[in-house]
Amino acid sequence: MMRLPVFEFRAPRTLQEAARILDGERANAMPLAGGTDLLPNMKRRQQVPRTLMSLRHIQSLSDIELSPSGLRLGACLTLAAIAGDPRFRNGLTALAQAASLVATPQIRNLATLGGNVCLDTRCNYYDQSYEWRKSINFCLKKDGTTCWVAPGSSKCMAVSSTDTGPALMALGARVRLVSHSGEREVLLSDLYNNDGIDYIKRRPDEILAEVLLDSLQGWKSTYWKLRRRGSFDFPVLSVAAAARLSRDKVVEGAHIVVGAAACQPLAAREAANSLLGRPLNQPAIEEAAALAARIAKPLDNTDFDMTWRKRVTAEFVGYALRELRGDDVRSERESFTRYAFD
Ligand SMILES: Cc1cc2nc3c(=O)[nH]c(=O)nc-3n(C[C@H](O)[C@H](O)[C@H](O)COP(=O)(O)OP(=O)(O)OC[C@H]3O[C@@H](n4cnc5c(N)ncnc54)[C@H](O)[C@@H]3O)c2cc1C
Ligand code: SF4
């Protein structure tokens, strides 16, 4: 049995108190939300904070605030609450789909939106027990000096594996980061680094308090996820797409994001821009799909063959865009994910 290391536990009741604790502890403390990723990581000694600071007693972090101008989602909202809430549809469908495809129902009941956005990167050589990692002399990401995926590389290329990250990026979301010294808003598309170790711009003394979304009136969105097991598995490729179409189905706005194909979700800007002002017909879809696949650079450090994952990127973009124009693509979705979404 893998046991947790010894740690101090703090359970503040306000955001201000939480920010004060993180300010005092600096890099020695980590926020604990659902704990569904952090606690297994601690058991494997991938992360060994001296202090765990639970966010679950801070009431305001579970609020949803809907207004005509947009939406504020507390970071401690569970993924189950988001997936099951009928308000998260049309413009917000991608977020609800992404949340509903994370892990298992039991985990989604605990797992939070903030924890999913801040999720650690993953790699076959890293997501192993302490003894397994010790037997290969560890790796760059933790305790070692070599990257076993690219031994000549000085950079870790562990994969961004968050499901809601790409979806929120496609929806133009921002996050509110709060610390003892103040607060700031950061666009999701600016939050991540393409680096498997230093993968997020959140400072250790900052708490992700809210996810903010402008009104998505008139938009439709969708999320496609590739994983080995249809029941539950981390993404090894994903595509989030959002579009606003005119009455005659001409594209007025579009965002496409590729997930789990690098250390950060990748905005496929050229692909999305290629659609603007055009009807969402087959040539337009194929062009955008090819452009999006070009930026996906999956590596051999997660499940499935990497060249196949790159090819699937183009297919997923095609399915996503066809779905956004109103095609029935349920059978394609089920063939990949064994999953249907109402
Ligand atoms: C079997 C299994 C399958 C899984 N499958 C998937 C999957 O398919 N897709 C997927 O995306 N994830 C998956 N996960 C990982 C995890 O369950 C989810 O990512 C979950 O959403 C993490 O949220 P949490 O609240 O449990 O985060 P925690 O584990 O509590 O925290 C995760 C990280 O975020 C930080 N953090 C949490 N909240 C905040 C905050 N508000 N502010 C600042 N930092 C914060 C923590 O310090 C930690 O570094 C899986 C996990 C397991 C065990
Ligand atoms: S990409 Fe390399 S350094 Fe990063 S976790 Fe994998 S083996 Fe370790």
Image (cartoon, grey):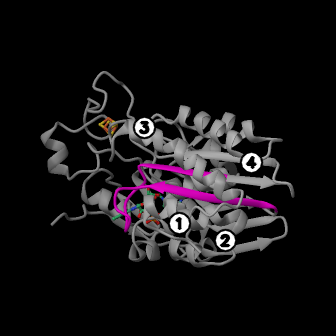
What amino acid type is highlighted by mark number 2? Phe
How many marks can you see?
A: 4
Query: Of marks 4 and 2, which one's residue comes earlier in the chain?
Result: 2
Q: Please tell me the numbered disc located at residue 157.
A: none
Q: Secondary structure at mark 2?
A: loop
Query: For the magenta stretch, what is the residue range?
Result: 218-241
Camera-side mark, 3 or 1: 3
Q: Is any part of residue 62 visible from this angle? A: yes
Q: Quadrant of ligand 1?
A: bottom left
What amino acid type is highlighted by mark number 3? Pro
Query: Of marks 3 and 1, which one's residue comes earlier in the chain?
Result: 1
Residue pointed to by mark 1: 99
Between the C-alphas of marks 4 and 3, the distance is: 27 Å
Is residue 321 or residue 226 the one in the foreground? 321
Q: Is any part of residue 202 visible from this angle? A: no
What amino acid type is highlighted by mark number 1? Ala
In the displayed structure image, the side of residue 128 where residue 163 appears, left or right: right
Query: Of marks 3 and 2, which one's residue comes earlier in the chain?
Result: 2
Q: Please tell me the numbered disc located at residue 298.
A: 3
Query: Of marks 1 and 2, which one's residue comes earlier in the chain?
Result: 2
Report if the beta carbon of the residue with label 3 is closer than 8 angstroms to ligand 2.
Answer: no
Instruction: Give yes or no for contact between labels 3 and 2 (Cβ–Cβ under 8 Å).
Output: no
In the displayed structure image, the side of residue 158 where residue 134 appears, left or right: left
Q: Secondary structure at mark 3?
A: loop
Residue visible at 86% across and 54% down? Answer: 248
Q: Position of residue 336 (x, y in %)?
A: 44, 58
Q: Position of residue 280 (x, y in %)?
A: 74, 48
Dot 4 crowding, Cα within 10 Å, few <14, some 14–19, many 20+: many
Dot 1 crowding, Cα within 10 Å, few <14, some 14–19, many 20+: many
Query: Of marks 4 and 1, which one's residue comes earlier in the chain?
Result: 1
Residue pointed to by mark 2: 88
